[in-house]
Image (cartoon, rainbow, N blue to C red):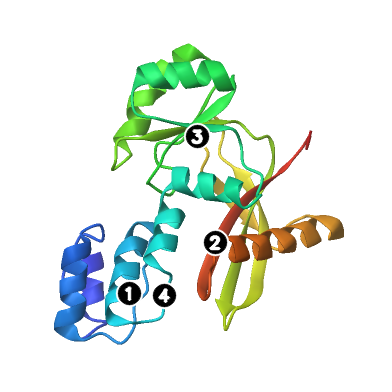
Amino acid sequence: TGVGIINTLQDVFEQIDLKDTSKVLQFAYKHKIDGIISPADIGVPAAALVAEKLQLPFHSTKLALYATNKYRMRKKARQIGITVPQFMLVSTIHDAIAASREIGYPLIIKPTDNCSSRGVFVINNENELNIRFSDSIKASFENKILIESLAIGTEGSIEAVIQNNIVTILGICDKIKSPLPYRYDLQLNYPGNYTHKQYEQLEYLVNKLVSGFNIKAGMLHIEFIILNNPL
C-alpha cells in the first residue's frame, strides 16, 4: 500500500489528517523538524502554521489562507488589480440561484476550499444548477461555493520559485481540458503555445501577483485563462 511504501522511506511516520493543524504541529514539535513542505494544497495551512511556530522557511499563514480559499484569493487578486471573473459567495441553493441570475449563464460553480477540480461544474441553466449544487457544496469543507462567470479561452498554468525575493519561472503550459460540465486537466503542453507578447504578459502577471500578495519565498503554481475575447 501507499502507507507501506512511505514507511520504508523515512525515519518516523504518523498517519495524520493534513487538515488537523494541531496534530501536525504536535508532530513537528515532537520530532524537532528542520523544514516542512506540503505534498498537497490541502496541507498548506498546516505547513504554514508549523513554519510560523518553529520559525522555518515557508509561506506565511495569511498567504496560505489566500492560496487555499478561492473566495479570499479572488478578493485579494481584485484588490491588487489582477483581472478575475465576476464572482459571488453562496452557501444555499436559494442564494446560488439569486447569484446566477445576477451573473448570468453560462457560469461555473466550485467549492471555496478544495482542489483538483473536485465539485467544479460548468452550469448552463437553472435546472443544471439545481442538479449540480449539492455535489459541489459537499466538496467544500466550509460548506460554501463560489459562483463565477465562465471565462472562455486558453487555459494554462505557471510553475515558478521565489528565492531571496527573486522570481524564476520554471515553465508555462497550455492545457487540454475535460469535456463539459467537468473542468479537470487531460493534458499539459510545455512550452505553452503562446505569442511572445502573451509570454511577456504572463511574466508581468507573475511579478504583479508576487508583489501584491507579498510572497517572499517558495514555490508557486498559478492557473490562468487567456480570453478568446478580452472585451
Q: Position of residue 14 (x, y in %)?
A: 16, 72
The residue that disc 3 covers is 182
Please state which of residues 155 and 75 is positioned toward the viewer in this rendering: 75
The residue that disc 2 covers is 213
Alpha-carbon span between mark 3 and mark 4: 33 Å
Rendered image quadrant of residue 48:
bottom left
Q: Is residue 219 visible?
A: yes
Q: Are marks 1 and 4 in contact (CB under 8 Å)?
A: yes
Please state which of residues 62 and 70 is positioned toward the viewer in this rendering: 62
Which of the two labelled residues, at mark 2 and mark 3, occupies the earlier sequence position?
A: 3
Q: Mark number for residue 115?
A: none
Which of the two labelled residues, at mark 1 and mark 3, occupies the earlier sequence position?
A: 1
Q: Secondary structure at mark 2?
A: loop
Please state which of residues 121 and 52 is positioned toward the viewer in this rendering: 52
Q: Secondary structure at mark 3?
A: loop
Mark 1 Cα-neighbour bin, 10 Å: few <14, some 14–19, many ≥20 = some
Q: Mark number for residue 52?
A: 1
Q: Please give the name of the residue rendered at 40% of the width and 61% of the height, measured from the top-left corner.
A: 62
The residue that disc 4 covers is 58
Q: Please give the name of the residue rendered at 34% of the width and 56% of the height, measured from the top-left corner.
A: 42
For the residue marked with disc 1, what is the amino acid? Answer: Glu
Please state which of residues 154 and 2 is positioned toward the viewer in this rendering: 154
Alpha-carbon span between mark 1 and mark 2: 17 Å
Rendered image quadrant of residue 8:
bottom left
Rendered image quadrant of residue 106:
top right
Q: Which quadrant of the rendered structure holds the N terminus?
A: bottom left
Mark 2 Cα-neighbour bin, 10 Å: few <14, some 14–19, many ≥20 = some
Q: Are marks 2 and 4 in contact (CB under 8 Å)?
A: no
